[in-house]
């Protein structure tokens, strides 16, 4: 067993993340103006890192750690070996990290010196001598340090940087495609079934319409996943404080931030490309959805009540997108009807988060605490009543009378709609559902039953059941 000092790189080695990128994304979420201004120093890497560390200081106790490297450090300390951290990150970040893990010696970027590659190798050789230390790293640039170390501890494949070295110890690292897919939140794509609503409401049951909406769903799913990644990158620190969100890939460090950024860019191109292929209107809707979602992630989600209005708008835009993709006109009455429903569901989302919170403190990154439960419940009830009244008024419109000859069945359909909304509000208030009510609704058997009863009554009122029966058996 080696008795030489063990030197650990921080970013990507001891930590399953990169502190500079974490600081940039945290800064974009908390002080975007100062963060963007810091990029004027990008030519001086050391000064840039120091400014990002000043604008967005990190909680080092929350940063995800590579368990194998941490265990190696503990074993080395128990054996009486010196353990040090040598990182290109700014000293203001690396020193607290070392203090937190009881590591006494620190090498980091400071006083205008960017401690990376050759500069780091020189500092370590000056401190320990040629071949006088073991070094753990994860990047191709670490080759310049490994060439002077006694043992090269390589995390992941290090971009091929360890090729040809002798005395190498391999440590698991990197990421998996499965973890990247998880970061895209594919379970959230189920919300995009809302794009079918205009087609169903207009009774436009044609193959070409169906296929167009399916393409629209692909576009919207890519757009939503793109923004989910942005949101998770902006909220990394807040997610680590959350009872469930701490397991998200970026918060847990199972997907590197650069991979997330590349995935985000690819998804954005897919979303806008497919939308442009469908129509200019669809392109405009998707672009507006992504812009509003980005504004929500950056600022609006922290504004009480405004965040719920924006959430309702984002859900409603899915219905507008369904109309744009299929070429079917979205009824104004339908849009007016669904908006208060989504207001209610936005309140349900916040009530669920509060009901599952561990304490009375405000939700991380949100403007609500448990004292707001009553107001959220009242607002959700107002949305429910508003939607039912609007649906009742719609039953007297010329469009409804033309589409649904049996008007009284529309009134009967109010009952399962009311039952479904009441159930969603109740379960949200009690904290007995998923954090996203739409995702929960797609798996809630009783709730799906209410929705199917509603749909069946509407089809019956429109005479569609008899028409389809006649086509099948006539």
Image: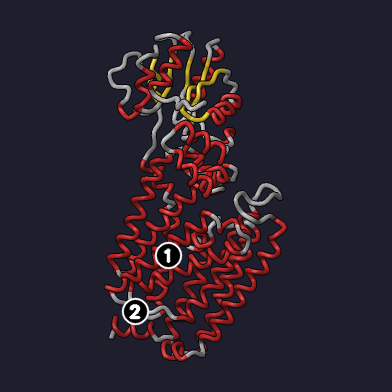
- Residue 188 found in image quarter: bottom left
Q: Label 2: state its secondary structure.
A: loop
Task: Calculate the distance from the C-alpha at mark 1 to the C-alpha at mark 2.
Answer: 26 Å
The residue sitting at 48% across, 36% down in the picture is: 48
Camera-side residue of 171 and 104? 104
Mark 2 Cα-neighbour bin, 10 Å: few <14, some 14–19, many ≥20 = some
Pointer 1 or 2: first along the chain? 2
The residue sitting at 44% across, 52% down in the picture is: 185
In this rendering, is residue 247 above or below 192? Answer: above
* Quadrant (top left, top right, bottom left, bottom right) of the N terminus: top left
Examine the rendering and report whether any part of residue 152 can be seen: yes
The residue sitting at 47% across, 62% down in the picture is: 292
Provide residue 50's location: percent of width, then percent of height. 52, 34
- Number of labels in the image equals 2
Give yes or no for contact between labels 1 and 2 (Cβ–Cβ under 8 Å).
no
The residue sitting at 67% across, 47% down in the picture is: 358
Instruction: List the residue tagged with mark 1.
Output: 288
* Quadrant (top left, top right, bottom left, bottom right) of the C terminus: bottom left
- Residue 174 found in image quarter: top left
Mark 1 Cα-neighbour bin, 10 Å: few <14, some 14–19, many ≥20 = some
Provide residue 62's location: percent of width, then percent of height. 57, 36
Q: Is residue 170 left or right of residue 236?
A: left
Instruction: List the residue tagged with mark 2.
Output: 204
Provide residue 26's location: percent of width, then percent of height. 53, 44
Q: Label 1: state its secondary structure.
A: helix
Provide residue 299's location: percent of width, then percent of height. 55, 56
In this rendering, is residue 153 above or below 176? Answer: above
């Amino acid at each position: 067993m080696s008795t030489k000092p063990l030197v650990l790189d921080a970013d990507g080695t001891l930590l399953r993340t990169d502190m500079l990128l974490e600081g940039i994304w945290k800064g974009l979420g908390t002080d975007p103006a100062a963060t963007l201004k810091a990029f004027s120093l990008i030519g001086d890497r050391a000064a840039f890192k120091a400014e990002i560390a000043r604008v967005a200081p990190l909680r080092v106790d929350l940063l995800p750690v590579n368990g194998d490297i941490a265990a190696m450090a503990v074993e080395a300390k128990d054996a009486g070996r010196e353990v040090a951290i040598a990182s290109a990150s700014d000293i203001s970040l690396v020193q607290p990290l070392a203090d937190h893990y009881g590591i006494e010696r620190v090498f980091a970027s400071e006083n205008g010196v960017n401690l990376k590659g050759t500069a780091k190798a020189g500092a370590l050789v000056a401190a320990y001598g040629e071949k006088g230390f073991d070094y753990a790293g994860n990047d191709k640039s670490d080759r310049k340090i490994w060439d002077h170390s006694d043992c090269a501890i390589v995390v992941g494949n290090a971009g091929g940087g360890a090729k040809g070295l002798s005395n190498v110890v391999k440590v698991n690292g990197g990421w998996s495609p499965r973890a990247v897919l998880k970061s895209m939140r594919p379970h959230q794509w189920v919300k995009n079934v809302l794009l079918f609503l205009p087609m169903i409401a207009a009774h436009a049951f044609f193959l070409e319409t169906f296929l167009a909406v399916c393409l629209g769903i692909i576009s919207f799913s890519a757009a939503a996943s793109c923004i989910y990644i942005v949101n998770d990158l902006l909220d990394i620190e807040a997610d680590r404080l959350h009872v469930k969100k701490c397991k998200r890939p970026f918060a847990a460090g199972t997907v590197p931030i650069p991979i997330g950024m590349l995935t985000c860019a690819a998804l954005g191109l897919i979303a806008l490309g497919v939308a442009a292929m469908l129509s200019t209107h669809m392109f405009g809707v998707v672009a507006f959805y992504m812009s509003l979602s980005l504004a929500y992630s950056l600022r609006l989600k922290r504004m009480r009540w405004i965040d719920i209005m924006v959430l309702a708008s984002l859900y409603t835009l899915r219905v507008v997108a369904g109309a744009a993709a299929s070429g079917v006109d979205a009824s104004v009455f339908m849009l007016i009807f669904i908006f208060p429903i989504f207001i209610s569901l936005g309140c349900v989302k916040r009530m669920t988060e509060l009901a599952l919170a561990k304490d009375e403190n405000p939700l991380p990154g949100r403007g609500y605490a448990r004292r707001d439960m009553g107001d959220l419940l009242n607002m959700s009830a107002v949305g429910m009543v508003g939607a039912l009244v609007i649906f009742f008024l719609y039953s007297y419109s010329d469009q409804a009378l033309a589409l649904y000859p049996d008007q009284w069945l529309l009134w009967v359909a109010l009952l399962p709609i009311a039952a479904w909304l009441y159930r969603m509000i109740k379960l949200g208030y009690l904290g007995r559902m998923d954090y996203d009510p739409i995702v929960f609704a797609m798996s809630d058997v009783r709730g799906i039953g209410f929705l199917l009863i509603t749909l069946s009554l509407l089809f019956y009122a429109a005479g569609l059941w008899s028409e389809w029966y006649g086509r099948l058996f006539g």
